Amino acid sequence: MDSVFKTTNKKKKATQKISSANKRVITAKGAKIDPLEQFLNKFEQVKLKDLVVFARQFSAMIGSGVAMLRTLTIIAEQCENKKLKVVISDIKEQVESGTNLSEAFARHPDIFDRLFVSMLKAGETGGILDEVMRKVSEFMESRQRLNDKVKSAMAYPVVALAIAVIVFWAMLTFILPVFQGIFQSMGGELPAFTQMLINLSEFMRSWWMLLIVVIVAGAVYGIRTWYKTEPGRYAMDGFMLRLPVFGDVIRKVAVARFTRTFGTLIRSGVPMLTALEVVKETAGNAVLSKGVENVHLEVRSGGTISKPLAKEPLFPPMVVQMVAVGEETGKLDEMLAKVADFYDSEVENAVEALTSVLEPLMVVGVGGIVGSVVVGMYLPIFTIINQLK
């Protein structure tokens, strides 16, 4: 009887523990999927910087011998991005239920792309997860540096152009009509340039201007929708590569990203064909993706990488030769890393040169726009003074 009584007590205690654990899980899940917080999380973006920090922390803790579940718990607790925090908590719960780590990450493709998942799977299979995650973080850091360089270079021209347009619109809409009343009270014929500005001001304050804005907005929306289709993206990316000045920079960015991604995958132990498939999906340029697809078909049939790569006009001869040497020596990942470093510096130099050319052009353009309106406002005054003399 005592043994039965003890067994019953043990079952009751176990049931109580399970129920309390379930309550904690339900409470945690309830807090995690709170309707208001879930709605706000939709507007929060997981930036590349957040993923870099996550990969660094994950690599350091796994390399230090911290258990997987504890690592995910600690990172989730101190994660500042709420959306990423929810995702990491979900990954931890899936791993607890017996799901493989790479499969748990693959269930969130909007945050962790196939490149991240493939490298994670390679590290998980080879038992070098900490090393692979370190390489992932280094790859993301280099990608972020490249993106920051391009964005910082383009920020000044875009801001200057926006300010010029706003100033021009404000002067024509609010200031010039005041001068127009003064000119009409003075009498006399207005100069042709001033009359042109007044006509432009009246047009900008009419319903026709609103119609033009709607048409432009519709055209932008149509182009963006067309770009989401495969033919539209291929045509637009090809057009961007053919631009006189910006096309060369875009091409170098695409080549740098291809070599960096492909080299990182090969070095992390991802099979060649799988690496080419991942690079094709994460290329960021439809023309480059099509070229990688042709290379993938050639390699799958037993060919080399360098030969089909030479047929693609997007890849410079130096890249093809470096890949050929890497295939011959068995050091393809090292060659790709060197090419990526070279093109990263090339992109930096090209962006600096482009910025040095655009800055004076934007200064002259802004000065010309504002100055033209000022000249148009003061021309009638000079004309009236000459008539009085």
Image: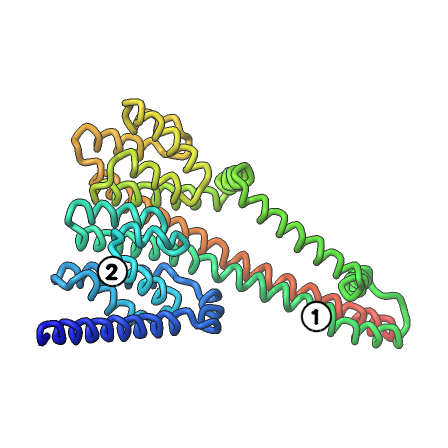
- The image shows residue 60 at horizontal and vertical percentages of 18, 62
Horizontally, is 93 left or right of 182 in the view? Answer: left
How many numbered marks, from 0 up? Answer: 2
Taking depth in this image into account, of 89 and 40 the one nearest to the observer is 89
Q: Residue at x 69, y 63 (%)?
A: 372
99 versus 37 height, above or below: above
Question: Which mark identifies residue 30?
Answer: none
Res 297 → quadrant: top left
Amino acid type assigned to the residue bearing label 2 in the image: Glu
Between 225 and 199, the one lying in front of the other is 225
Whether pointer 2 and pointer 1 mark residues with C-beta atoms closer than 8 Å, the reply is no
* Left or right position of 366 against 24: right
Residue type at numbered disc 1: Met
- Residue occupied by mark 2: 96
Q: In which quadrant will I find the C terminus? A: bottom right
Q: Residue 166: which quarter of the image?
A: bottom right
Q: Report whether residue 242 is seen.
A: no
- Name which of mark 2 and mark 1 comes first in the sequence: 2
> Closer to the camera, 253 or 351?
253
Crowding near pointer 1: few (<14 within 10 Å), some, many (20+)?
some
Q: Which mark is residue 171?
A: 1
**Residue 45, image x and y in percent?**
43, 63
Name the residue at the right extreme: 187
Alpha-carbon neighbours of circle 2 within 10 Å: few (<14), some, or many (≥20)? few
Estimate the spatial distance between the alpha carbons at disc 2 and disc 1, rounded to whole Å: 64 Å
- Determine the image quadrant of residue 190: bottom right
Where residue 128 sits in the image (x, y, percent)?
16, 50
Considering every residue shown, the one lying at the far top of the view is 302
Does 367 appear above or below 136? below
Is residue 121 rendered to the left or right of residue 168?
left
SS at circle 2:
helix
Residue at left offset 81%, top offset 62%: 199
